[in-house]
Image (cartoon, rainbow, N blue to C red):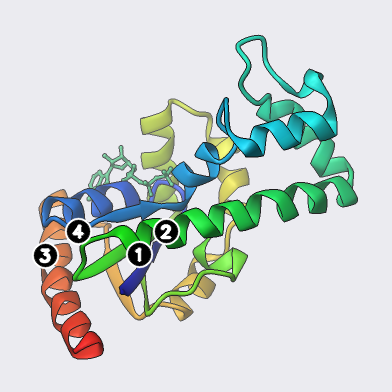
Amino acid sequence: MFVVGLTGGIGSGKTTVSQRFEHHGIVVVDADTIAREVVAPGSEGLKKITAHFGPQILLANGSLDRQALRKIIFSNESERRWLESLTHPLIRTEIEARIQAAPGPYTILSAPLLLESGHYNVNRVLIVDLPVVEQITRASARDNADRRMIEKIIASQLPRTERLKHADDIVDNAGSLEQTLYQVDALHLRYLQLADITLN
Ligand code: ATP
């Protein structure tokens, strides 16, 4: 399968771009969604986490108390490693399975930390790009979140110039929505061609 890794900073437009690929019938595998699913209520992942940290890691409704977990792993390196050694293989296996199951001719793997985590295997990297000022404006307008929180998240991600160095393709999302969709449509045609050349 020909896989295009899609990434970009918070609020850059990854969802907007993903939805356009889906509109063309392309399967988008979302790493964030899978990361939540592998620790959802009833999952093996959540059972192991509960066995390790105790039932106080659960909220009253039986779902994972992410805030409590974050507190533990930010202050305890070995607990963080334990958690990652549990969740990363589960996430990777599920991502692989969904990519294998996708009808093609190519698949998009959307992962906010595609470049930071360094363990995704993709044929091509597509970056959705937006100046930081615009990222802050759009992300805070959408989430009703305060700017300081958004700025913190941006600071924890790769700087824009670093991210762009990894790009095979770039969607410039600073313009209108129409301009963005136009770029995605052109990329879709390009990926059909590249998948055909690579796989046949
Ligand atoms: P996150 O990383 O926070 O999940 P994202 O990268 O998925 O964000 P989107 O949710 O697609 O980003 O876009 C962020 C916000 O900006 C949304 O409210 C979206 O509707 C808006 N937006 C996306 N593209 C444009 C555009 N070209 N012009 C104006 N607004 C846009």
Rounded to the nearest whole Å, what is the CA distance between mark 2 and mark 3? 27 Å
At a point 48% along the width and 45% down the height, the residue shown is 34
At a point 11% along the width and 57% down the height, the residue shown is 24
Rounded to the nearest whole Å, what is the CA distance between mark 4 and mark 2? 16 Å
Task: Examine the image and state in which quarter residue 103 appears.
Answer: bottom left
Residue type of the residue flagged with mark 3: Asp
Mark 4 residue's CB less than 8 Å from ligand 1: no
**Could you tell me if the residues under marks 2 and 3 are in contact, i.e. CB atoms within 8 Å?**
no
Query: Dot 3, how many residues are within 10 Å of its Cα: few (below 14), some (14-19), or many (20+)?
Result: some
Instruction: Tell me the number on the disc at residue 100.
Output: 1
**Could you tell me if the residues under marks 1 and 2 are in contact, i.e. CB atoms within 8 Å?**
yes
Label 2, on which residue?
97
Q: Earlier in the sequence, mark 1 or mark 4?
A: 4
Task: Examine the image and state in which quarter residue 47 appears.
Answer: top right
Percent position (x, y) of residue 58?
71, 20
Label 4, on which residue?
26
At a point 65% along the width and 49% down the height, the residue shown is 87
Instruction: Tell me the number on the disc at residue 185.
Output: 3
Determine whether the residue tagged by mark 4 lies in a helix, strand or loop. Answer: loop
